[in-house]
Amino acid sequence: MTTFTKSGLAAAMLAVFAYLPLHANAALFDDDEARKAILDLRAKVEAMRNELGGRIDTKADKSSTLDLVNQHEGTMAEIAKLRGQIEVLANEIANTQKRQKDFYLDLDARIRKLEPRQVNIDGKEAAVDPAEQKAYDAALLLFKAGDYKNAGLALGDFVRMYPESGYAANAQYWLGNSHYALKDCKAAILAQQVVVKAYPDSPRAADALLNIASCQTELKALPNAKKTLNELISKYPDSEAAATAKERLKAK
């Protein structure tokens, strides 16, 4: 067996405790490794304490050893405290990362809601942004509810704000119908003429001409009405509006 002197024993114990802080620092980087190191150190110190207890005879030596053991226990407590702090920090980091991820997911969802989306309007694809869609839907809802005055105001605002919209031709057409529903034939004719001139390729153009002819008939402008019906048949011969125009001409 190896024989320890007082100074040798003290040096051995100091070497052990000089080794402890290194493993305490390791806990800051790897909790599993730190836990294993702590268990190993406790086992080594316990073994040394048992061996030293049997070898040291003097009260002074025993007292010195107990002091070192107490220091060891204090170091173990400090390591445990640091390990607890590491766990708290790791939990806070995980929570922060989750909040950041949720934030970016929410931001991405909000941005997507603001981005234009492709919509099929009368057989054609058009990019429509959410505000544009909302404004058109709200205006059309007023018309369908029979609130023609406010529908006309909303549709007029829409065509001014979104002149290039895929819904512009339809909005202009329903604007004319709003005026017609309010018995304002002159305003209705002007609105439908915009549809015919600005959006000649729109499916609403033929219907706009038919509505113009209806307004002209109500205003007793029969020659103008007949001219408009013939224009309708000439420009849009295959449309349902053209078939209606032919029936009206036969009745005149």
Image (tube, grey):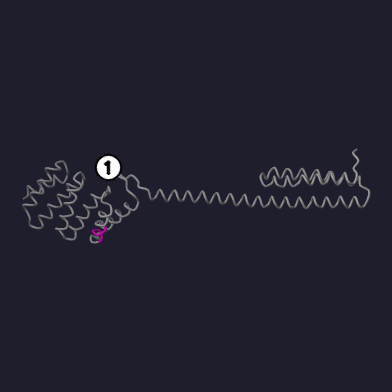
| Residue 190 drawn at (x, y percent) | 16, 55
Residue at the image point whose x is 28% and y is 45% from the top: 121
Q: Is residue 246 left or right of residue 165?
A: left
- Closer-to-camera residue (18/135): 18
Amino acid carrying label 1: it is Lys
SS at badge 1: strand
- Closer-to-camera residue (6/96): 6
| Circle 1 crowding by C-alpha within 10 Å: few under 14, some 14–19, many from 20 | few
Residue 100 in the magenta stretch? The answer is no
| Residue 26 drawn at (x, y percent) | 70, 45
Magenta: predominant secondary structure element? helix
Residue furthest toward the right? 57
Find the magenta span and give its range.
Answer: 150-154
Q: Is residue 24 left or right of residue 161?
A: right
Q: Is residue 35 left or right of residue 160?
A: right
- Closer-to-camera residue (101/210): 101
Residue furthest toward the top? 1
Total label count? 1
| Residue 166 drawn at (x, y percent) | 27, 47
Asked which quadrant contains residue 38, the reply is top right
| Residue 115 drawn at (x, y percent) | 37, 48
Q: Quadrant of the N terminus?
A: top right
Residue 151 in the magenta stretch? The answer is yes
Residue at the image point whose x is 88% and y is 46% from the top: 7
Look at mark 1 in the image and give the residue it sits on. Answer: 124
